[in-house]
């Protein structure tokens, strides 16, 4: 939906040769962040603590990744730290897919690999610890 709004309201066109890269990037990101979400639920004890825990874990990577602040305002070393977490590589992979000046087919292989690795880690944790019913702790 957001892509359609960008397309019609802002003329943000996806280059034809980058369409596959955009689809793969969105699918890898959705699967990885979904798996990380299920993994995160294993440390949340109740509904009252869910929002503060999620905010404490997710907001710092957003701020250091150049999502809320321009990357040019952040120190280079902080961007290097952010590149280890999945948010910045996902953002960079989306940028490569949307950017008509990206070389090749728009795939950001290393960035997608980092996001996928986090997704696999989240999947492994979720597969081992996730339960549909509350656990006594």
Image (cartoon, rainbow, N blue to C red):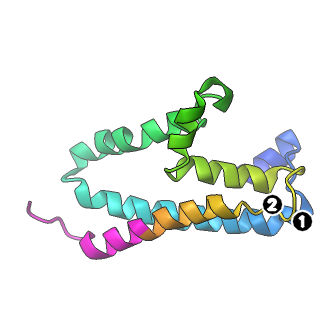
Point out the frontmost of discs 1 and 2: 2
* Tag 1 secondary structure: helix
Task: Decide: is 6 above or below 93.
Answer: above
Left or right: residue 33 versus residue 28 is left
Identify the residue position indicated by label 1 in the image: 17
Task: Decide: is 16 above or below 58.
Answer: below
Q: Give the CA separation, mark 1 to mark 2.
A: 8 Å
Task: Decide: is 47 above or below 72.
Answer: below
Identify the residue position indicated by label 2 in the image: 106
Residue 86's x, y, as percent?
Answer: 52, 53
Mark 1 or mark 2: which comes first in sequence? 1
Q: Are marks 1 and 2 in contact (CB under 8 Å)?
A: yes
The residue segment tinted magenta is 121-137
At 43% from the left and 66% from the top, the residue drawn is: 35
Left or right: residue 53 versus residue 24 is left
Mark 2 crowd level (few <14, some 14–19, many ≥20, 10 Å Cα)? many
Mark 1 crowd level (few <14, some 14–19, many ≥20, 10 Å Cα)? few
**In the image as oriented, which residue stretches furthest toward the bottom?**
127
């Amino acid at each position: 939906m957001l892509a359609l709004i960008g397309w019609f309201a802002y003329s943000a066109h996806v280059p034809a040769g980058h369409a596959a890269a955009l689809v793969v990037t969105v699918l890898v990101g959705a699967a990885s962040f979904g798996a990380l979400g299920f993994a995160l639920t294993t440390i949340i004890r109740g509904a009252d603590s869910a929002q503060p825990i999620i905010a404490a874990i997710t907001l710092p990577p957003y701020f250091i990744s150049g999502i809320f602040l321009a990357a040019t305002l952040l120190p280079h070393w902080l961007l290097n730290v952010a590149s280890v977490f999945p948010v910045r590589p996902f953002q960079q992979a989306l940028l490569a897919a949307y950017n008509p000046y990206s070389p090749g087919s728009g795939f950001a292989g290393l960035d997608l690999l980092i996001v996928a690795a986090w997704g696999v880690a989240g999947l492994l944790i979720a597969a081992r610890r996730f339960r549909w019913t509350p656990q006594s702790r």
